[in-house]
Amino acid sequence: MTTTKLKRVGILTGGGDCPGLNAVIRSIAKPAMSFFGATVIGIEDGFEGLVEGRARELTPKDIGGIVNLGGTILGTSNKGNPFKFPVETPQGVEIFDYSDNAIRNYKDWELDALIAIGGDGTMHIVDRFTDLGLNFIGVPKTIDNDLAATDVTFGYDSAVSVATEAIDRLHTTASSHHRVMVIEVMGRYAGWIALGSGLAGGADVILIPEIPFRWERVHEHVLRRSKHGSRFSIVCVAEGARPAEGDLVVKETDAKRTDPIRLGGVGEYVGKQIQEGTGLETRVAVLGHVQRGGSPTPYDRILATKFGSMALEIASQGKFGHMVSLKGNEVVAVPVKEAILKLRTVPPDSQLILAARAVGTCFGD
Ligand code: F6P
């Protein structure tokens, strides 16, 4: 096995923030300092900092007391893809390849390894830099839980826990007023958060991107409940859900983002259609970034700590171009190329879907 001397280790967090990022940073930096005697360089604001040369040396004080802290002490950005770097010009936003700047900074900082913690977009960038000969390791994060090659990403459990508590709270007001309550949660192309929190919170209807829905099915279900069952319904909808004959509801597009589409608004759309289609009084709650902020759950702190320490371990073994991944109960290393082949979406025949259907949940199909 190759071993790599780890004298200088870089860490960056890319893409949207996510509970557990600081726990990963801590579990890379602590053993890097104590076991390897390495200098740890924290790159600021993700790949933007790598391109622009913004980084600082992390001290033991920086990484103390952060295991329970949400967000990321390094800052992050979903706009700094070095291969497609957005620059404001008088003509508008123009895209340039600034990967040379990133490589120059990596070399100037004399990094032996750079551990990038991020989602799908980050792993694509890790893969490209690996092909260019840089010593990159990936750590998968996203509340959406949609990265292939790992059973779960840290951050997902925290998001589901916040969304479930929100659904519990909506239940009491929905039942008191005999209303339909729609809750919009995150989940761009995968419905894991809506499915997890909808199931845990006992939502009556769950709408996810993987199962395009029909309005008549949704209307029938809430009407049936209103007439023959409880006089209220909870509808949990992922931001990326869409009707069988309809499109994604896009809030805005922003050319600077790694993924230019910003979703949002499907909750309002679903609420309006239900009220008009059934005559039942309907209210809408959009959970938004509340589900991404705040402290990680114990599960996410533990997973993040396992991921971070394993990332450093595989860096010391010279396994560059790999991402740490949870397989069953074990954290292992998988090639990043495997992780970016496709997104991990909800299989419509998965046990979770079948269990939800067994307890009467409607998916609108
Ligand atoms: O990818 C994670 C995610 O939380 C998505 O579910 C959501 O669409 C997106 O981030 C929101 O990103 P932003 O914070 O840039 O609006």
Image: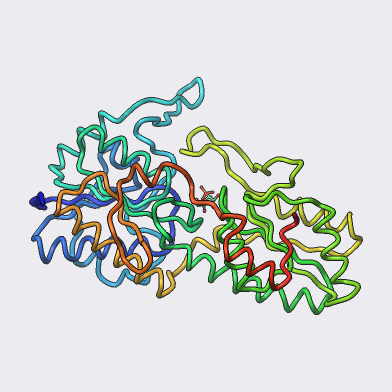
Name the residue rendered at 26%, 31% in the picture: 101
**Residue 133 lies in what quarter of the image?**
top left
Give x and y (percent) for residue 312: 20, 57
Q: Total number of numbered labels?
A: 0
Q: Position of residue 76 (x, y in %)?
A: 38, 50
Instruction: State left or right for residue 346 relative to residue 83.
Output: right
The colour scheme used to paint the residues is rainbow
Which quarter of the image is occupied by the C terminus? bottom right
Rendered residue at 36%/30% (across/down): 83
Q: Quadrant of residue 24?
A: bottom left
Q: Kindly identify the residue that appears in the image at 81 percent across and 72 percent down.
A: 232
Q: Is residue 136 above or below residue 223?
A: above
The foreground one among 355 and 189 is 355
Please state if 224 lies on the left or on the right of 320 as rendered: right
Residue shown at the point (24%, 47%) measured from the top left: 55
In the image, 207 versus 256, the foreground residue is: 207
**Relative side of 317 to 19, left or right:** left
Residue 165, quarter of the rendered image = bottom right
